[in-house]
Amino acid sequence: MRSTPIAAAGLVAAALAASPSVAADAPDPANWDAVTEAARGQTVYWNAWGGSTTTNDFIAWVGARVADTYGVTLEHVKLSDTADAVSRVIAEKQAGQDSGGAIDMIWINGANFAAMKEAELLFGPFAESLPNWSVVDFEGKTVQTDFTVPVEGYESPWAMAQVVFMYDTADIAAPLGSMGAILEWAQANPGRFTYPQPPDFLGTTFLKQALIDLTDDQAVLSEAAGDNYDAVTAPLWAFLEELTPHLWRQGRAYPAAGPRQLQLMADDEIDLAISFSPGEASTAIANFQLPETVRTFVLDKGTLGNASFVAIPYNANAQAGAMVVANFLLSPEAQARAQDPSVLGYGTVLSMAKLDGEQRALFDGLDLGVATLTPAELGTVLPEPHPSWMTRIAEDWAARYGVAE
């Protein structure tokens, strides 16, 4: 989630060919006492999506907690596009700035992570040496691969996401089980559905979800897009050709991001919206952002799921402080707070079986909310396609349907 696709190949080409040098005195996550000692007094500049008030508030809470406990100052650098942070690291590398970089941590996944990893722009491996990795559910959740790319300790997970569709039961009688059903409903109810404009991550997520649901052989999407691209994506473009004229404002305009979708639903302009957080509708209802009649559903064949990660650039100025923040994000305290629908409603990356009784009680006491599906109701979690598919699809969508912002 929260990672806008970029032209990964172009990004890698822009980076210098030489591998970055990592200082010999870089903090070793295996020596945690030394890490926390080095982190005290550091300021961590976390470049993260800033388009949600609830997310911004959660990051501010994290900052208060790591300041109190570890003496680390956390500054949230609010992004609208993750690629902006990646470009900054590339520019520093090209300028020979192999230490003292401006970015200490990035909320990242997908094509941005794949490009940075390939260009050797990341500090690590560190994630699996963090103390709280011991309670991560790395056996049952996709936290060791990112859009099919092996993580290998170069980013640390902190939230789980899965596509759901929010719908107003006052206007839609029952869940819609497929993209075909969504199309039929949209044709019968013109103007009542939209999705954020790509390259916003939710917009590109809708395109991916449509591609997966319309593709007979989903396994082909696990490999890089090649000569088969046109044939595999043909059903997606045919679907969009039929859908677009029936979207909100006839597809001549799109909401800029997820929060704008919520506003459209609250204003009764649309009845159906996509989300990458199973708890978002409950959170929005609790915050009086959505009517109490909103519920969620998933598609019959399953929906996309992935993890949110944080990564540390190879030249970060506060590598120790960034690892402290990453480790705190994996703590049962932070994970339970993030899962609380009144805060964020994100899924946890932790294994309940690995927690002690007091830690599990943090999760058992949560009311997940009126619109949140149970794990069983969420059904099959589908893997992300290889990042190359989304890079090309986002570019093609812009050429076909892109509108001025």
Image (tube, rainbow, N blue to C red):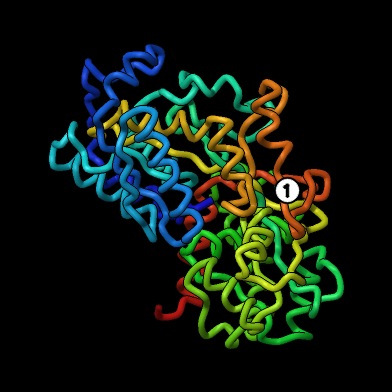
Residue 296 vs residue 244: left or right?
right
Q: SS class of the residue under badge 1?
A: loop
Residue 28 lies, in percent from the top left, at 34, 16
Residue 380 vs residue 103: left or right?
right
Query: Which residue is under mark 1?
Result: 367
Residue visible at 46% across and 21% down?
A: 130
Q: Residue furthest front?
A: 68
Position of 391 relative to 179 (above/below) = above
Most foreground residue, 10 or 263: 263
Residue 294 lies, in percent from the top left, at 74, 69
Residue 279 vs residue 388: left or right?
right
Most foreground residue, 235 or 198: 198
Residue 341 lies, in percent from the top left, at 64, 52
**Rendered image quadrant of residue 244:** bottom right
Q: How many numbered marks, from 0 up?
A: 1
Q: Is residue 121 visible?
A: no
Residue 252 vs residue 194: left or right?
left
Position of 122 relative to 241 (above/below) = above
Residue 293 lies, in percent from the top left, at 77, 72
Q: Is residue 197 visible?
A: yes
Most foreground residue, 175 or 232: 175
| Mark 1 surroundings within 10 Å by alpha-carbon count, few (fewer than 14), some (14 through 19), many (20 or more) | few
Identity, as a three-letter code, of the amino acid under mark 1: Asp
Residue visible at 72% across and 39% down?
A: 365
